[in-house]
Amino acid sequence: MEERLSKGPSSLRQGSLKSSLSGRSTPKGSPTYRRLNSSRTPRREARSGAGGTQWFRSNRVVYWLLLITLWAYLGFYVQSRWAHGHKKEEFLGFNGGPRDKLVDAEQNTRRDLLTDDSLVAVNNITNKTQGHVDRKIDVILAKKGNGFTSRKKRSKRRRRNLPKVRDKLKAKTNTANSDAEGQELEILQKNSTFGLLVGPFGSLEDRVLEWSPEKRSGTCDRKGDFARLVWSRRLVLVFHELSMTGAPISMMELATELLSCGATVSAVVLSKKGGLMSELARRRIKVIEDRADLSFKTAMKADLVIAGSAVCASWIDQYIAHFPAGGSQIAWWIMENRREYFDRSKLVLHRVKMLIFLSELQSKQWLTWCQEENIKLRSQPALVPLAVNDELAFVAGFPCSLNTPSASSVKMLEKRQLLRDAARKEMGLTENDMLVISLSSINAGKGQLFLLESADLAMNEDPLQTGSEVKKSLDIRQDQSSLSVKHHLRGLHQKSRNLDVSSTNLRLFTSVNTTNAVSINGTHRRKMYDSKGAQEQALKILIGSVGSKSNKIPYVKEILRFLSQHAKLSESVLWTPATTRVASLYSAADVYVINSQGLGETFGRVTVEAMAFGLPVLGTDGGGTKEIVEHNVTGLLHPMGHPGTRVLAENLRFLLKNPNARKQMGMEGRKMVERKYLKRHMYKRFVEVLTKCMRSK
């Protein structure tokens, strides 16, 4: 064995070792050979360079690890060069054009999902501003260095700087929007000439009522049909925005009810405009951040998708394009009643499973538009009017799921009176003040300016001096005498139910108005007395919701300009911030005004809430308000627009003079809410919708 080992290597050494002088091999038996090779043994020879190479070849794991390391290094090098823009157009033969186009296409797809025209306008302005900033960057970069900067380098640096520029522009845009949205709040806080800013009263409610919405453990009636249908179901609710207005709040409460009944709920928010995000988090409603692919995948797995506004048309269109069979699982709860909303929705109305409307008038209007456009719906629309939620019903004194032995409906009526006294004290009101409130976003469609004009007429103008238009709208004769007004007032009371105002009081009321006037600084001001000769209550107007993201700033400025021209009126105006805690406001009020213009209010959730608190409602004679307010029974109606201002002024003065009349109307309103507009009534309607939509896709 040793001979073989020594023989092989020795032969190799003989062939490889040569004299550096002669070039011949050293003889094996010479002293030089023995001196050079005396230390060589087979074991030591294995440790030589040739032996190390053999060991490396025999360990293939090390070989592959080395290859992987080299490959990873090459990959990181290529990625680094590509990411930092080192000649992307020529690097490794690739071109950046197609990728740029893909990114642009993706951005355009996401931009199409924006549903608010104002947001699209802001994006366009931002893009133009970015281009302007890009040109500035070019100029600045050209001045740096040795006076020469290549065009490619400028473009590379510009691309690297664009994200920072976009972030700065986005921050500036958000700041500008927040400044605009809170502009009226700041004006009212700093300038008391436009009225007094009061509230919010959430902490007051918690202290007086010894209860808060955060303490509730759920409102679901688990023995009802609604809970049985939604238990363990997966539903997706689509919010068009998160403002503190009717549609988003109604969708939020629907999501809360579904969760408390054992359903899995995900919310798709098309625009985070508004202040309900924190409230959604408090109620543990999961919000899907992505409005495109992720929301589509979530909706595909759901048992039902409920879209809560006509503005959701763009999302529905994109979803059906992504998933053609998806229309069979969509129930579209439309809460608007203007033609512009129909026009943006008409392309997908016939593709959803069912349309849901709030009122009969709204349903007829949309079906008429569908006939004009030859649109055939997949099924007959359903009617699901809004209702008073359990939180407000609980404070208003209705039996509901939140009642406990220590907080029965009777005890809550007593606490509501304490809440009224405390809230009015904070507002600076006395018992002789009649507080008229109007809670909605401040825009021309809600008619706050017309309300203030009517209040100014009610306080400063003799109601007997009415024009022919007003008398025609009220069906009274073309006569400006006190007799015509007396007949009109008597007619109002004859149509009312059990009103505690006699004709003798009416005659006294008329005679007092025609005789009690005094001259102050050359102008006529009346001493206000009620039907019994006592001093009449003063008129106070409270307007909300200040700071709402649905407010129209130009319209707010117009209102403030009007108040600056009517100093006496501004002394009687109160403002309150946007809030979801409105029980104290309803408790403190005496009258509610829903003064919607155009086609009128679609339904008016605030209308039924006010009626639940025993308030008579003064509303416009249009839209869903006519279906809620029974004229001369639960409130009084007036025409829309300028013709309605004088009629509204007369109605204000009538309720101002007759506390018993507004008390009786408020009682009738509570009875109507108890019959039609509590939560159980709304979800009974929803049972029919869910049954039809979930039966077959």
Image: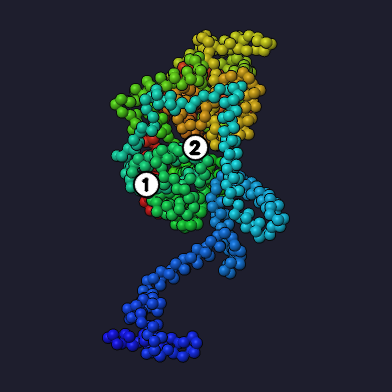
Relative placement, left or right, of 222 versus 132 is: left
Label 1 packing within 10 angstroms: few (<14), some (14-19), many (20+): some
Q: Is mark 1 on a helix, strand or loop?
A: strand
Which residue type carries mark 1? Thr
Q: Where residue 284 sits in the image (x, y, percent)? A: 39, 41
Task: Depth check: give the residue in front, 570 or 619.
Answer: 570
Relative placement, left or right, of 231 versus 81 is: left
Picture residue at 43% right of the left edge, 54% below the top: 297
Mark identifier at residue 275: 2
In 3D space, how far apart are the residues under numbered discs 2 and 1 (Cα atoms)?
23 Å
Q: If the image is split into quadrants, where does the C terminus sit?
A: bottom left
Q: Can residue 331 be seen in this view?
A: no
Task: Depth check: give the residue in front, 597 or 100.
Answer: 100
Q: Residue furthest left?
A: 1
Q: Which of marks 2 and 1 is nearer the N terminus?
A: 1
Picture residue at 58% right of the left edge, 29% below the top: 186
Q: Where residue 532 sits in the image (x, y, percent)? A: 50, 10
- In this view, 382 is above or below 197: below
Residue denoted by label 1: 264
Which residue type carries mark 2? Gly
